Image (cartoon, rainbow, N blue to C red):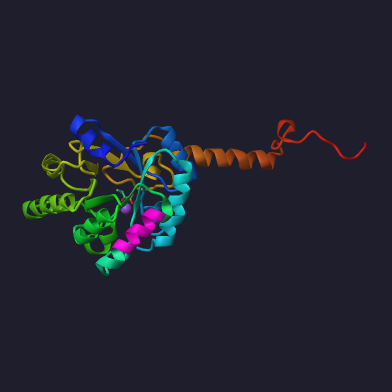
Amino acid sequence: MKVTSDWKKMKKEGEKITMVTAYDYPSAKQSEAAGMDTLLVGDSLGMTVLGYNSTVQVTMDDMVHHAKAVRRGAPDTYIVVDMPFGTYHANVDDGVGNAITLYQKTDANAIKLEGSECIDIIRRAVGAGVPVVGHLGLTPQSVGVTGFRMQASDEAAALQLIEDAKAVEAAGASMIVLEAIPSDLARKVTSVLEIPTIGIGAGVDVDGQVLVYHDVLQYGSERLPKFVRPFADFNTTGVEGLKSYAEAVKAGTFPDASTTYKRKVFEE
Ligand code: KIV
Ligand code: NA
């Protein structure tokens, strides 16, 4: 299993970091079997597995419940877990307390929080021994303010994002997710930081990539964002499998001898 200090080393050595989201026991088991460097229990679970239209409704209890299942499925993989909306903006003390609680209850390796408003929380959580991952650019918890669209697309916003990334690094974060920003900006941020950048919709010139499990495998996902390439099609194989099962039941061809216990309890 990777440890937090490996991330800087991988960046230095130019080895790309692979990350995918995982939300439950089977997705975690598959991701560990696939050899992912790290898993993210993203609050995107609100959309991908709970069917909400944003991450805003996701609670601390939801994150703990799912992250514990992911840990059981991937005991030997570095796991990052998202702090959900509303648990780190009211004040610094509660934010730090929630970071510690989430880390401790889930046995994750790091917590992630969005934006540059929370520099003090990052510094104090790291000081308390909780590894922290930052997240800049499109931050889905703020979708009500920003919309789901590319961020930092003009020079002033881009320069601000570079300053924010430096501040997140200075506060002690061990990686930064960069979501939905121009690729030349992502390259620039990557070149000025010592900690790795993990891109999603940020082009190829970053230190690693993250995608949502349900997007990579097309599993329940409908409209894929521009930056997703699907690598499998669970939607099609899943629906086909279920249809075949239903047809076999209707036709009386399932179960058959091979799927029925042989033992009889009545004499003929
Ligand atoms: O919740 C999530 O899936 C994320 C990734 C998109 C980075 O935060
Ligand atoms: Na998230």
Q: Is residue 70 magenta?
A: no
Residue at the (41%, 51%) spot, across then down: 48
Q: Is residue 102 magenta?
A: yes
Q: Is 147 placed left or right of 22 in the picture?
A: left
Residue at the (24%, 51%) spot, across then down: 134
x and y percentages locating residue 195 in the rendered image: 19, 42
Quadrant containing the C terminus is top right
Q: Residue furthest bottom?
A: 90
Q: Is 17 placed left or right of 167 in the picture?
A: right
x and y percentages locating residue 224 in the rendered image: 33, 45
Residue 208 position by quadrant: top left
Q: Is residue 172 visible?
A: yes
Q: Which residues are magenta?
A: 96-104
Residue 22 position by quadrant: top left
x and y percentages locating residue 52 in the rendered image: 40, 59
Quadrant containing the N terminus is top left
| Nearer to the camera, 117 or 209 | 117
**Secondary structure character of the magenta stretch overall:** helix
| Nearer to the camera, 192 or 50 | 192
Q: Is residue 84 visible?
A: no
**As displayed, is residue 167 above or below residue 190?**
below
